[in-house]
Structure formats: structure tokens, C-alpha cells
Image: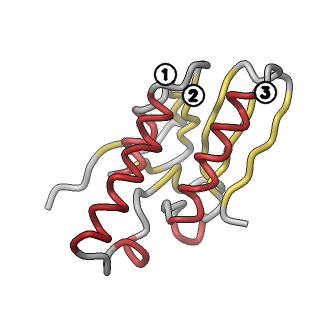
């Protein structure tokens, strides 16, 4: 299981479950996030949508370079467009959203956190972009 969503007391909590990959987003996680957003939007019991990463080292390290790195041309453009659509869906979600940042949120992980309305950050977490 690479991602899961649980609901408790009005909160839909989406967890990226890839701590061995520092919770990097791959195609499976991207689709699961979109599905979770649809489910939470349609469920009247859900009052807030929250997202976090499994473990305590990384909220999300961005895109999975093993999956996305080899993509070129139209495939790369399609993947980036798709990821942008999912981030925009999170940004414009009609219910409040929160990022529970429990470790590094780098690159796409920073984008994921900043697409949320609120960010709750564990002490010692790092958020930003890697400069090359």
C-alpha cells in the first residue's frame, strides 16, 4: 500500500506510505490522492482534508525520480501536467486542507504542503527546493 486515507471525527487523513522512498510521489500515489480528494469532497461528514507522510523523516521528498526521471518529451509533459492538475485540485479544494509536515518537504513535497490552506510543521522539519 503506497497511500491510504482514513476518516475520523470529520477529518479525512491522506497518508503517503512510502517511507523507504522518503514518501516520494509516484503515479500510484498521484492517482490515490486524486481519488481521496474526490471521496472527501463528496462525503458530507468530512470537514477538513489533511495530508501527511508515513514515518518521521519525510513528509514528501517530491516526485519519484526512479519513475519520473526516465520520462522524456510528451511523456514527461503529460506527467507534469497531471501532477499540476492534482496540485491545483488540492489548492482549490472546497473544504479546508492541512499539511501535517512531519519531516522534509522538498521540491514537489514543498509544493504539496503549500497547496494546502494550513501547514502544521514538526520541529526540525525542512521545507524548500533543492538548488542545483
Determine the image quadrant of residue 94: top right
State which tag comes first along the sequence, 3 or 1. 3
State which tag comes first along the sequence, 3 or 2. 3
Q: How far apart are marks 1 and 2 (CA)?
A: 6 Å
- How far across and down, in percent of the image, does residue 80 sit? 33, 56
For residue 100, above or below residue 30: above
Between 102 and 123, the residue placed more toward the observer is 102
Q: How far apart are marks 3 and 2 (CA)?
A: 17 Å
Residue under label 2, please give it: 98
Q: Residue furthest front?
A: 74
For residue 40, above or below residue 5: above
Q: How far apart are marks 3 and 1 (CA)?
A: 19 Å
Q: Which mark is residue 43?
A: 3
Residue under label 1, please give it: 117
Q: Residues within 10 Å of mark 1 (few under 14, many from 20)?
A: some
Q: Residues within 10 Å of mark 2 (few under 14, many from 20)?
A: many
State which tag comes first along the sequence, 1 or 2. 2
CB under 8 Å between discs 1 and 2: yes
Amino acid at each position: 500500500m503506497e497511500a491510504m486515507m482514513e476518516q475520523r471525527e470529520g477529518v479525512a487523513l491522506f497518508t503517503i506510505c512510502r517511507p523507504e522512498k522518503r514518501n516520494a510521489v509516484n503515479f500510484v500515489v498521484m492517482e490515490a490522492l486524486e481519488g481521496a480528494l474526490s471521496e472527501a469532497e463528496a462525503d458530507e461528514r468530512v470537514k477538513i482534508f489533511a495530508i501527511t507522510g508515513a514515518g518521521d523523516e519525510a513528509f514528501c521528498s517530491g516526485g519519484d525520480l526512479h519513475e519520473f526521471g526516465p520520462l522524456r518529451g510528451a511523456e514527461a509533459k503529460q506527467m507534469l501536467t497531471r501532477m499540476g492538475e492534482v496540485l491545483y485540485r488540492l489548492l482549490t479544494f472546497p473544504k479546508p486542507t492541512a499539511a501535517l509536515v512531519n519531516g522534509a518537504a522538498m521540491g514537489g513535497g514543498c509544493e504539496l504542503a503549500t497547496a494546502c490552506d494550513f501547514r502544521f510543521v514538526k520541529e526540525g522539519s525542512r521545507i524548500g527546493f533543492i538548488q542545483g
